[in-house]
Amino acid sequence: MDIINYELQLSLLLILMLFFSSAHAEQASLSIRKDDLMVKTLTVKQFRQLQSDLTSLTVDNPTDSKVHVYQGILLKTLLTRFFGKDWQQFDALKFSSQDGYQPIIPIANVMAHTGMIAITEKGQQSLSHLPRINGETVNPAPFFLIWENINDAPARTDEWLSWPWQLTDIELTHFAREYPNSAPPATADEKVTQGFLAFRQHCMKCHAINGDGGEMAPELNYPVNVTEYWQPQWLARFIDDPQSVRANSKMIAFYRDVENRAALIETIIAYLKRMKNKKITAAPKAVMETKGSSSD
């Protein structure tokens, strides 16, 4: 009898855990902003209630190399619902995830391809877990940005298209507003300027310069520039293949299919070197907030 009671209690506990987990997921929210001004906040439940906008999209997910049929709302449909056609006048869309990942995608690229904010998969109540490095997995729910890349072959090689999961925010913005502290001096040479554009495209989703950029990975200029403590040849190798320098590094290798890859890495390092003479005088906002929230 004790064994039976234990099994019943365990079953009830599992049912309750699943119930509360599902309820919590339904209350997770997605904020939609314009230049940092809140326009709308949608819970998963409210998102589902936009019945006329819900649709399906079949994609080849680059994370697990499998074909998935996702269900959600097309990105352009969602933007038009809340902004009309005005969203097309902005420079970019900034996406924020729970882990601090913060990619920015030019509006031109959004318009050229078919993206979707997915919340479920066909025949499922939620989203499938996806593999990560070191055998780990991640649940991309509650909101996952995906791109149609089966019929749209260029979407497979468009380096601006990110697939951020666990989304919390979508924001219409302008590049000048996003990166006021990271542009190189006006006197910088062409190589440095090219490096800035490459860094902005490939690296700022995770890294920041003087507080401009993502929060998932280290700030690279304040208070000490990365080229002041990394030798150039090792920095180039780390960008090229992080795990060849640091075991179990979570940083991914620089995009393998980029044209002139080695030369592009050189321009990024030239940009980083130039920025060591353009440091802010106060800690970036993200650094200050992190210190302020520390429990140590």
Image (cartoon, rainbow, N blue to C red):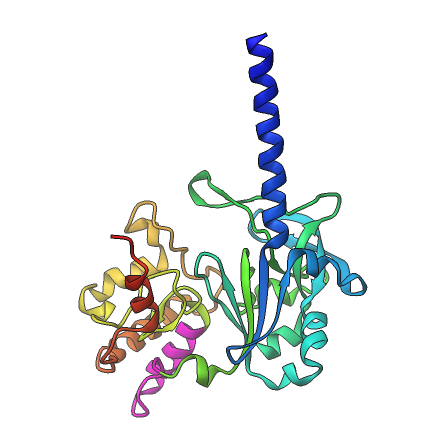
Observer-nearest residue: 100 or 110?
A: 100
Residue 195 makes an appearance in the image: yes
- In the picture as drawn, the residue positioned furthest to the bottom comes out as 187
Q: Position of residue 207 (x, y in %)?
A: 37, 66
Residue 218 in the figure: left or right of residue 97: left
What is the quadrant of residue 254 in the picture?
bottom left
What is the quadrant of residue 288 in the picture?
bottom left
Q: Please report the residue visible at 40 percent of the width from the left and 56 percent of the height from the top.
A: 253
Q: How many marks?
A: 0
Read off the magenta span.
181-200
Magenta span contains residue 183 = yes
Q: Please report the residue visible at 63 percent of the width from the left and 67 percent of the height from the top.
A: 154
Q: Eyeballing the image, is 222 above or below 257? A: below
What is the quadrant of residue 185 in the picture?
bottom left
Quarter occupied by the N terminus: top right
Q: Position of residue 29 (x, y in %)?
A: 59, 60
Residue 56 in the figure: left or right of residue 27: right
Q: Position of residue 72 (x, y in %)?
A: 71, 58
Magenta span contains residue 110 = no
Residue 222 in the figure: left or right of residue 9: left
Q: Eyeballing the image, is 89 above or below 101? A: below
